[in-house]
Image (cartoon, rainbow, N blue to C red):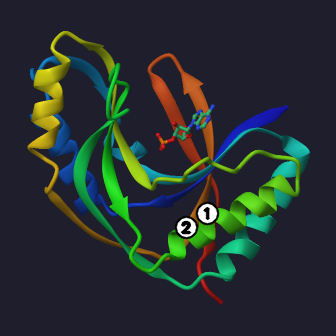
């Protein structure tokens, strides 16, 4: 058996509820979308795809090893953006900035550790973000993009990253269900 797995940073509820409020403000603005639920909002660092059961313990151990090498850090959650920036709308992201550079360092070292296990993990041009909504149909994409632009400076808060979470993702008809498999503290 295999488990669909990804590595992520959690976000405090205060920030997540601000994000849910912001996605509500985009309703009836020209696009029909599926908002990501409050419990499913996080920063994905590495999507690993299907991981064989007998490899999971090693994934968790390597994830913990990489996490231990990066000290705690703060990241900012500010502004919404449409993805992709042009062409058919697919998603709305909250932008995440990584002033210390430690998130990028953690992501790269996890990617290297996971590739060493024969797993994917390398995201081309890693752009940290929180996915807020997936667009189903945009009747008026310009109106929707404009509504998102109006939230480009919205400040959702500063998050301290203290642990890395290994998540299992189960795809259900009502949407994905994410279950933490392991948590690893950042820093030694
Ligand atoms: O949190 P975000 O939205 O960035 O998009 C999926 C989500 O990332 C991503 O893994 C996270 C948890 O599901 N994901 C799902 N399938 C993917 C794939 N085939 C994928 N990322 C890359 N390739």
Return the residue at label 1: 107
Q: Position of residue 27 (x, y in %)?
A: 13, 26
148, 52: nearer the viewer: 148
Query: In the drawing, what numbered circle is on residue 45?
Result: none
Q: Position of residue 104 (x, y in %)?
A: 55, 67
Q: Is residue 129 visible?
A: yes
Residue 123 located left or right of residue 140: right
Q: Quadrant of residue 182?
A: bottom right
- Disc 1 to disc 2, C-alpha distance: 5 Å
- In the picture, the quarter occupied by the N terminus is top right
Q: Is mark 2 within 8 Å of ligand 1?
A: no
Residue 44 located left or right of residue 53: left
Residue 67 located left or right of residue 174: right
Q: Is residue 57 visible?
A: no
Q: Residues within 10 Å of mark 1 (few under 14, many from 20)?
A: many
Mark 1: secondary structure: helix
Query: In the drawing, what numbered circle is on residue 104?
Result: 2
Residue 168 located left or right of residue 94: right
Q: Residue at x 79, y 56 (%)?
A: 114
Disc count in the image?
2
25, 86: nearer the viewer: 86
Q: Quadrant of residue 150?
A: top left
């Amino acid at each position: 058996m295999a488990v669909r797995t990804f590595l992520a940073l959690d976000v405090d509820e205060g920030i997540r509820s601000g994000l849910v409020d912001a996605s509500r403000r985009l309703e009836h603005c020209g696009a029909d979308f599926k908002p990501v639920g409050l419990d499913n909002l996080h920063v994905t660092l590495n999507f690993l795809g299907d991981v064989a059961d007998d490899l999971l313990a090693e994934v968790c151990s390597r994830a913990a090893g990489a996490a231990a090498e990066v000290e705690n850090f703060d990241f900012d959650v500010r502004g919404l953006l449409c993805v992709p920036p042009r062409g058919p709308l697919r998603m709305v992201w909250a932008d995440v900035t990584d002033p210390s550079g430690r998130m990028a360092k953690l992501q790269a070292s996890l990617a290297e550790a996971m590739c060493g296990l024969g797993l994917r993990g390398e995201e081309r041009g890693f752009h940290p973000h929180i996915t807020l909504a997936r667009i189903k149909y945009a009747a008026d994409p310009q109106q929707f993009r404009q509504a998102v632009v109006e939230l480009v400076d919205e400040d959702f808060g500063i998050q301290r990253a203290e642990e890395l979470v290994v998540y299992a993702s189960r795809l259900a008809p009502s949407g994905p269900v994410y279950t933490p498999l392991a948590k690893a503290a950042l820093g030694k």
